[in-house]
Amino acid sequence: MDATLTTDLAADLQTQGCAVCDHLATRASDFFAQWQYALYADEKTRDEYAAGPGLCPLHLWQLEGVSSSIGVAVGQAPLVERIARALEQAAAVPSDRVTVESLVPKADDCRVCRLLRAAETDYLGRLAASVGGRQGKEHYARSHGLCLRHLAQLVMTVPENETAVFLLGAVARHFKKIGGDMCGYATKTEALRRELYTADDHDAVLRALTHLAGSRRVCSP
Ligand SMILES: [Zn+2]
Ligand SMILES: [Zn+2]
């Protein structure tokens, strides 16, 4: 095995979706599992969160999805109260229209977005080193590849043109295969020949959307 093709990368590439998206979804889910409890149980974590800008809409709703309602109430109350105080002060100053805008979290403000961006860069760096080697290429060629967004980032990360060409050839084959599976699914469905479905026909639409848009667990505008 190439020194750079680690066991975890090799296992990750067996996914039918995008290995990078899946890795980021796991990192986010691990973070939320620990942090939603800390927000509820630890005053220091809560105060530090309340003093900051908060989370982006996607990650605030994902946090809500893994929290109990009392966890959300306890964890978010200090932030909501800080915002109430800031708005109260703004309302007391005639013509202050700036404060409210400053309370809206910006793209770089969300700690989960920042954590995932760092994890994404690290993972793509490891994947780029892996596909630079012969065994990494062989393994990648047998995988379902990445979503378009992560493929574009990987192509820009690999140093050698030869590896970029390899990646583009592989993704062209992946998309051709998915397109063929979707047409097969549509044709057999319209002809009422569901008994002819293959396993690949069944999940063709899900694979197509995942490879076009990335996993729904990590996608954001
Ligand atoms: Zn992806
Ligand atoms: Zn975010």
Image (cartoon, rainbow, N blue to C red):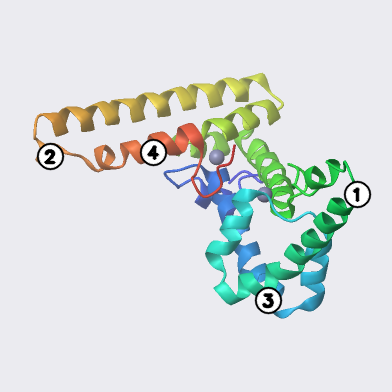
Crowd rating for badge 2 (residues with CA inside 10 Å; few <14, some 14–19, many 20+): some
Residue 64 x/y as whole percent: 57, 63
Name which residue type carries label 3: Tyr
Q: Mark 1 points at which residue?
A: 93
- Tell me the distance, in whole angstroms, between the alpha carbons under discs 4 and 1: 54 Å
Front in this rendered view, residue 133 or 22 = 22
Give yes or no for contact between labels 1 and 3 (Cβ–Cβ under 8 Å): no
Q: Is mark 4 within 8 Å of ligand 1?
A: no
Residue 55 x/y as whole percent: 70, 54
Give yes or no for contact between labels 4 and 2 (Cβ–Cβ under 8 Å): no
- Tell me the distance, in whole angstroms, between the alpha carbons under discs 4 and 2: 19 Å
Give yes or no for contact between labels 3 and 2 (Cβ–Cβ under 8 Å): no
Q: Residue 207 carries which label?
A: 4
From the viewer's perspective, tell me whether residue 76 is left or right of residue 62.
right
Label 4 or label 1, whichever lies nearer to me, is 1
Label 2 or label 1, whichever lies nearer to me, is 1
Front in this rendered view, residue 209 or 51 = 51
Name which residue type carries label 1: Val
- Tell me the distance, in whole angstroms, between the alpha carbons under discs 3 and 4: 37 Å
Residue 186 x/y as whole percent: 21, 30
Tally the numbered discs.
4
Name which residue type carries label 4: Arg
Question: Which quadrant does the C terminus fall into?
Answer: top right
Residue 65 x/y as whole percent: 53, 62
Q: Is residue 132 visible?
A: yes
- Residue for point 91% across, 49% down: 93
